[in-house]
Image (cartoon, grey):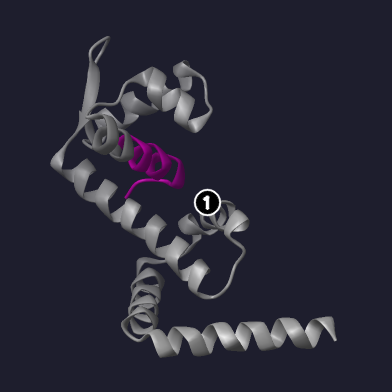
Amino acid sequence: MPTPSMEDYIEQIYNLIETKGYARVSDLAEALSVHPSSVTKMVQKLDKDDYLNYEKYRGFVLTSKGKQIGERLVFRHDLLEQFLEIIGVEESQIYDDVEGIEHHLSWNSIDRIAELVKYFKEDEQRLQELRDTHLDQTTDVQA
C-alpha cells in the first residue's frame, strides 16, 4: 500500500498523463512544488514498488497497478470535493480541505461518503432541503 506521499505523486502523475499525455520530472516538480531531485527519488521508489516504469532521462509511465491506484485516488479526491460542496463548505476552502483530509480516511469511509453523495445527487429536493438546513443554521448564528 502506498504512503500518503506516494499517493500524492501517483495521483499527480495520473492527472498529468490524463491531461498532457505524459509526465516528466519537471512537470511533477512544478505541480507538487518540490525540487526535481525529490521527484527523481520518489519516482525511483515508485518504480521499485511497481507503480510506474521509469527510464532515466526518458520519463515514466504508470504500470497497470499504478494506473488503477491513480484512478482510485482521483475518484477519492473528486468525491471529497463533491461531498464538501454538498454540505456547504465555501468553494474557496474545498481544495485545501480535501488535501488535508484525503489521506486520513479509510476506503470504507470513502465508500460511505460516495453513497451519501449519490443519495443527495439522485434527488434535487433532498439536496435543496440540506442547503435550506445550512441556510437556516447560518441565519440562526447571525441572529
Residue depicted at 83% across the width and 81% down the height? 142
Residue 49, quarter of the rendered image? top left
The amino acid type, in three-letter code, at marker 1 is Glu
Residue depicted at 25% across the width and 51% down the height? 71
Give percent across and percent down for residue 74: 33, 52
Residue depicted at 14% across the width and 42% down the height? 64
Q: Circle 1 sits in a helix, a strand or a loop, which is it?
A: helix
Q: Is residue 140 visible?
A: yes
Q: Is residue 47 above or below residue 131?
A: above
In the image, farthest residue toward the top = 57
Q: Is residue 83 above or below residue 8?
A: below
Instruction: Count the marks.
Output: 1
Please tell me whether residue 10 belongs to the stretch shown in magenta: yes
**Along the horizontal axis of the image, is 80 left or right of 56?**
right
Main secondary structure found in the magenta portion: helix
Residue range of the region highlighted in magenta in the rendering: 1-13
Give percent across and percent down for residue 110: 38, 69
Residue 23, quarter of the rendered image? top left
In the image, farthest residue toward the right = 143
Q: Which residue is mark 1?
A: 99
Which residue is nearer to you in this view: 106 or 24?
A: 24
Q: Is residue 40 visible?
A: no
Q: Which quadrant: the C terminus?
A: bottom right
Q: Is residue 71 above or below residue 60?
A: below
